[in-house]
Image (tube, grey):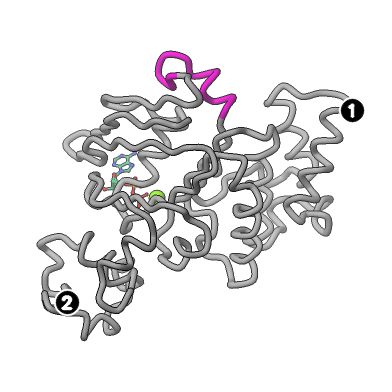
Amino acid sequence: MLEVKNLKKHFGHIEAVKGISFTVEKGEVLGFLGPNGAGKSTTMRMITGFLPPTSGTAIVCGHDVQKDPVSAKRAMGYLPENAPAYDSMMVTDFLRFAARLRGMSGVALEDKVEATIHKCHLLKVRNQSIHTLSKGYRQRTCFAQAIIHDPPVLIMDEPTDGLDPNQKHVVRSMINDMAAEKVIIVSTHILEEVEAVCSRAVIIANGKIVTNSTPDELKSQSKNGRLDEVFRRLTLDDEDDAYKPASAGEKDAHKLSPAHKEDM
Ligand SMILES: Nc1ncnc2c1ncn2[C@@H]1O[C@H](COP(=O)(O)OP(=O)(O)O)[C@@H](O)[C@H]1O
Ligand SMILES: [Mg+2]
């Protein structure tokens, strides 16, 4: 249902994405994992047609995003990184605007906006301006924008980044509720997310896929069943060797959480 075919992106001399291919079927939630700067957002922007690839393409429900971008975009909902939205709009008006952009009007539009406000737990803030929302509500408003047209394919870039545990739980529940009906890709560098929502994980580092497997298969690569140890082993490059656990070893794995990578 979604096929990513050898996507590459160069920014000048930077090779941000170096040939990424994978497929995702309906009912799958694919975790798109990797350290900061690995190329997750760039890949998602290319899949969703927001950024032209240097080469390669994505086929979304049979539509090539390069050759037939309108049909491909119609089939997708996209929650970009940092949940961009129009700050001065009220939540309800923003969702009406998103629904109009998706071709809805009249009673059908109002019904859809109401249903989406309920589904995304936005009742309390529906009449608030977006700039007054807490991060969790802002994220959910942008999530609502992404699903307003009930797309078969949903692409979410770090949907729980910076949320508190309760807010994360709500977003993850919303993803799980939709999982059976859609193709979903969720990027994250939060490993607990993989176990909470993903049926499969693609890990990328330096613009390339280093593994594509189920969370259980990944965990089985560590003696202690620790995803963070597997993630670190697969994604640390030579410059980071000093932080690599000894090859035997997971004995020191607790000393470096993946969060340390964010500061590097
Ligand atoms: N518009 C851009 N111009 C130049 N370099 C970019 C641009 N966007 C991303 N990059 C670079 O591409 C690499 C991948 O970035 P990104 O896709 O944002 O990674 P991730 O989302 O995994 O953190 C990084 O080295 C980043 O600095
Ligand atoms: Mg990113």
The residue carrying mark 1 has its beta carbon less than 8 Å from ligand 2 = no
At x 51% / y 41%, what residue is drawn?
Answer: 155
The residue carrying mark 2 has its beta carbon less than 8 Å from ligand 1 = no
At x 69% / y 32%, what residue is drawn?
Answer: 149
Query: Of helix, strand and loop, which one carries label 1?
Result: helix
Residue 11 in the image: above or below residue 264: above
Please indicate whether residue 119 sits to the left or right of residue 176 in the image.
Answer: right
At x 68% / y 26%, what residue is drawn?
Answer: 102
- Few, some or many residues within 10 Å of mark 1 (<14, 14–19, 20+): few
The CA distance from mark 1 to mark 2 is 59 Å
Please indicate whether residue 245 sits to the left or right of residue 116 in the image.
Answer: left
Give residue 99's quadrant in the image. Answer: top right
Quadrant holding the C terminus: bottom left
Query: Of helix, strand and loop, which one carries label 2?
Result: loop
Residue 32, horizontal then vertical, whole percent: 39, 50
Residue 198, horizontal then vertical, whole percent: 48, 55
Please indicate whether residue 205 sits to the left or right of residue 202 in the image.
Answer: left
**Three-letter amino acid code at the position of disc 1:** Val
Residue 11, horizontal then vertical, whole percent: 25, 35
- Few, some or many residues within 10 Å of mark 2 (<14, 14–19, 20+): some
- Per the rendered image, the range of residues in magenta is 64-75
Residue 255 in the image: above or below residue 169: below
Residue 136 in the image: above or below residue 45: below
- Indicate whether residue 49 is drawn in magenta: no
- Mark 1 or mark 2: name the one nearer the start of the chain: 1
Residue underneath mark 2: 245
Residue 169 in the image: above or below residue 60: below
The label shown at residue 107 is 1
